[in-house]
Amino acid sequence: MKKIFTCIICPNGCEITAEVEGQELVSCFGSLCKRGEKYVKQELYDPRRNVATSVLVENGDALLVSVRLTNAVPKAKIFDVMNEIKKVHLIAPVIIGQVIIRNVLDLNSDVIATRKVAVKSK
Amino acid sequence: MTIKKDVVIVGGGPAGLAAAISLYKQGVEDIVIIEREKQLGGILRQCIHDGFGLTRFKQTLSGPEYSQKFIDLVKELKIECVTDATVIEITPEKKVVAISKLGLLVYQAKAIVLAMGCRERTRGAISIPGSRPAGIYSAGVAQSYINLYNTMVGQEVVILGSGDIGMIMARRMTLEGAKVKAVFEIQPYPSGLPRNIEQCLNDYNIPLYLSHTVTNIKGHSRLEGVTVAKVDEHLHPISGTERDYACDTLILSVGLIPENELSMGCGIKLDGRTKGPLVDDYYQTNIAGIFAAGNVLQVHDLVDFVSAEAEALAASVVEYIKKCRLTPAAINIIADADIGYTVPQKVSGEKDFQISLRVKRPLKNCEISVIQAGTAIKSIKLQKAIPAEMIKIRLTKSDLISIDDLKVVVK
């Protein structure tokens, strides 16, 4: 069966035509680089995504600190991860790269801060 | 009191930051960045999604992480930054006037870098009829409410326009528990990148309807719903195709406009197609010593390219500061009907350069050629070319065979 994929790995967004039997990838073409085939395989067997959101911070010069995952997680777990992140409240200061949740839901991915928040000046 | 500077940079977003660092590293150290917000970073501060920096840093960063790399470098180099200061006037004599908490600041520069970025088109710009309730936001405004001010904008959402920020906000609002009912695009093709259709809409089963637009807005104090209709090939709504969608929020992602009021006040000529200044291969405007790069020049898809453009500009500014003049550009670049615009619009022929352009409609298996005196001096073949993706063609000085104008054609 022929299936069309849009690669999301980089902004080229290659349109990849794949020949698929069941869940097996038989062949594919249309990507500008070899990451395309890897992406198609990942999509067939275990589609994964990163999640970017934010967490409340107390006593900071900003209300929120933006966060993301260090590794993509299974697509079906996105909302579970969101719920875990929503439980967190931080106290300033926060630095970029600070681990907010280590190994979230045992998915082999950390939630890290992507901006710094300094302590609110009095 | 007038403060003398070699270069005044207007805007502390990605273009201004990259220009400043590059100028400093090339020995032009007497510079200042003027930024109207309290912090540096520009629009990247609110772009918390990932995907930035793939070209430049070979990793996928969020907007704040990408901009912090430049901010840290600006701080490390001790480049002067004046934040919370709004430039109100630029003159052809290179005077820059700003208002700030410190009072009026007047600079006399040898060169000015325009790095003001762009702003969003609004409901007024696209003239949607109907009432004027609360609940209608441009995508970037909704993004700042949610990502910077912890304020959710609504629960039942319709999005007009398939720009990248609109699609990114469709995903963001879905993650925050809102129901995004659909995205409507008036053109027969999407205006954002394919990867965002995939990861922001398809992943969350949000439908995208092409050749559709909003024809009415209903509600008194708060938005209650919108009417949507199909459009014909002239983009006119087709009567009888109207459908009503109940919603409390309408997000507009209908295009970005380079922010050039200061430029116009200074007599800088703009390109009617890009809405940015007309520039040559030095990124110099029609006024000698005033340069432009980033979204104020042309709206980019990727910040990596904004940074690169600002660095190319910096090299020209360094040359200008040394020589006090640059070779005038007399070779025009003329685009054919399938090409929306080119930047630059003319070149000097004295240096290597890059032409940025966009096609006007989606094309497959096409060839884009640069023609001079009847000869194709450079051609690139593309499997696909879409309006959402900026295309770049690099030319060297030696590619040019005469001083005739360049034509850029697609076939």
Image: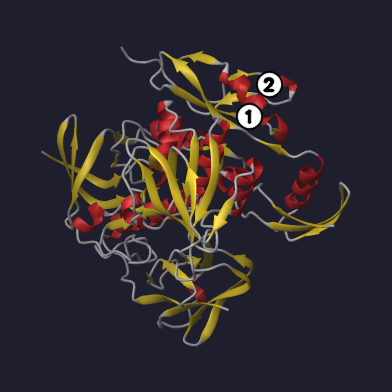
> Residue B367 vs residue B124: left or right?
right
> Residue B265 vs residue A34: left or right?
left
Write down the chain letter for disc 2: A
Secondary structure category for the residue under label 1: strand
Residue at the limit of the structure toward the bottom, as seen here:
B374
Res A86 → quadrant:
top right
Indicate the quadrant containing the C terminus of chain B: top left, top right, bottom left or bottom right.
bottom right
Write down the chain letter for disc 1: A
Q: Kindly tell me whether residue B252 is visible in this rendering.
A: no
Res A50 → quadrant:
top right
Q: Which residue is mark 2?
A: A104
Q: Which residue is mark 1?
A: A69
Q: Are marks 1 and 2 on the same chain?
A: yes
Indicate the quadrant containing the N terminus of chain B: top left, top right, bottom left or bottom right.
top left
Q: Which one is in front, B379 or B390?
A: B390
Up-down: is B67 above or below B112?
Answer: above
Res A44 → quadrant:
top right
Q: Kindly tell me whether residue B22 is visible in this rendering.
A: yes
Tell me the crowding category of disc 1: few under 14, some 14 to 19, or many 20 or more residues within 10 angstroms, Cα based: many
**Going 43% across and 33% down the picture, which residue do you hit?**
B153
Q: Position of residue B119 (x, y in %)?
A: 35, 48
Tell me the crowding category of disc 2: few under 14, some 14 to 19, or many 20 or more residues within 10 angstroms, Cα based: some
Whether tag 1 and tag 2 are in contact, CB under 8 A, the answer is yes
Nearer-N-terminus badge (1/2): 1
Real-space Cα distance between discs 1 and 2? 9 Å
Instruction: Tell me the amino acid under the disc marked 1.
Output: Leu
Q: How many marks?
A: 2
Q: Position of residue A70 (x, y in %)?
A: 65, 30
Coloration mode: secondary structure
Instruction: Tell me the amino acid under the disc marked 2.
Output: Val
- The circle drawn on residue B151 is none
